[in-house]
Amino acid sequence: MNPANRLHALGQSLWLDNITRTLVQDGTLARYIREIAVTGLTSNPTIFEQAIKNGHVYDEAIRTKAAAGLSDEALFFELAIEDLSAAADLFAPEFQRTNGVDGWVSLEVSPLLADDTEATVNAAVDLHARAAKPNLYIKIPGTPAGIPAIEEAIAAGVPVNVTLLFSAEQYLAAAEAWTRGIERRLDAGLPVNVSSVASVFVSRWDGAVKAQLPTTLHNRLGVAMMARCYREYRKLLISPRWQKLISAGVSPQRLLFASTSAKDPALGDSYYVDALAAPDTVNTIPEKTLLAYVDSGNPGPLLPPTGGDCETVLASIAAAGVDIDALATKLQRDGAASFVKSWQDLIACLAEKSQKKSG
């Protein structure tokens, strides 16, 4: 068994954080599913921007759709839904085999809606209906405006991948929103198995504080924050509130580790993936990290349900002058701003390619 298969055997789902038309059409994604135990896929505006900008595989479709009068944003969502629908079909056997636990793909609402709850809900409902794939998550950021949108989307029956979470507090707010949405459906007598994952971001923590910390604490904050989130997740799984939902047939929202590629050259490619092995969770990783992991990954000891020494590590980092709560807020705001920038670059790229429709 390669390291990715071993990780899967430990009970953690490994998803690919990438999507391109070529990846789907040339058989690469199917091979990853078959050989590397990849059981899902995530996307975001940055991934699509890079895929469309750095090549010509989308050019003909862009010209055709632009000629039909689609706006740049509408054109993008058609392209994205086409790619993700094809990927969803590849993952459909896994989705069916696991009764909807695995086999998911994700499409994000426009980052421009991050501060507009009502518009986010409307977009989530619309995109999910247009894709018409049962194994498509709609990604909604766990920002202050996004939290009520998550509840409303779940209540409306839309599966949600909550994105841009950094701290245990942000994670718990997202988990609460999913729980309220499911409880509303249960009270209304509606089907209650509306799936969700909550994506907590790892590596950005360590990059943000490296200059402030002694070398003994370098690259320890991200894993410690994830251990804290995992501890809270394990508490929810055995809580009377979630146990009631599970008894009613609900599959609980899973914790997902994102941004798990190592940014520090001093680290091995598989540092965060090895450190965050944990059953009943998901790890979504870029293609480069996935391939490196297959070659040299070594799943470490499982994360302890109690969080292990995370509070000791976090206390040391706080004592070194890091305001962890304030940094969590900043990282979420910066992440949202980064996605807006990628979105704007993506739309500009589509506009440029659309104008070349005549050759």
Image (cartoon, rainbow, N blue to C red):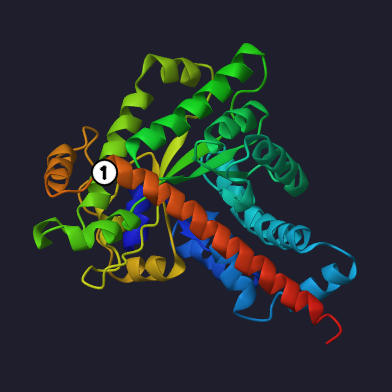
- Residue at point 29%, 49% (across, down): 277
Residue situated in front as seen by the camera: 224 or 100: 224
Q: Secondary structure at mark 1?
A: helix
The residue pinned by badge 1 equals: 324
**Looking at the image, is 34 positioned above or below residue 295?**
above
Residue type at mark 1: give it: Ile
Q: Is residue 270 above or below residue 224?
A: below
Asked if residue 12 shows in the view, the reply is no
Q: Residue at x 36, y 19 (%)?
A: 239
Q: Residue at x 74, y 59 (%)?
A: 73
Residue 264 vs 285, above or below: the answer is: below
Question: Quick check: can you spot residue 98?
Answer: yes
**Residue 97 appears at what percent x and percent y?**
55, 42
- From the viewer's side, name the closer residue of 346 and 62: 346
Q: Residue at x 62, y 64 (%)?
A: 344
| Rendering quarter of residue 235 | top left
How far from the left and from the top, in percent, is residue 282? 41, 46
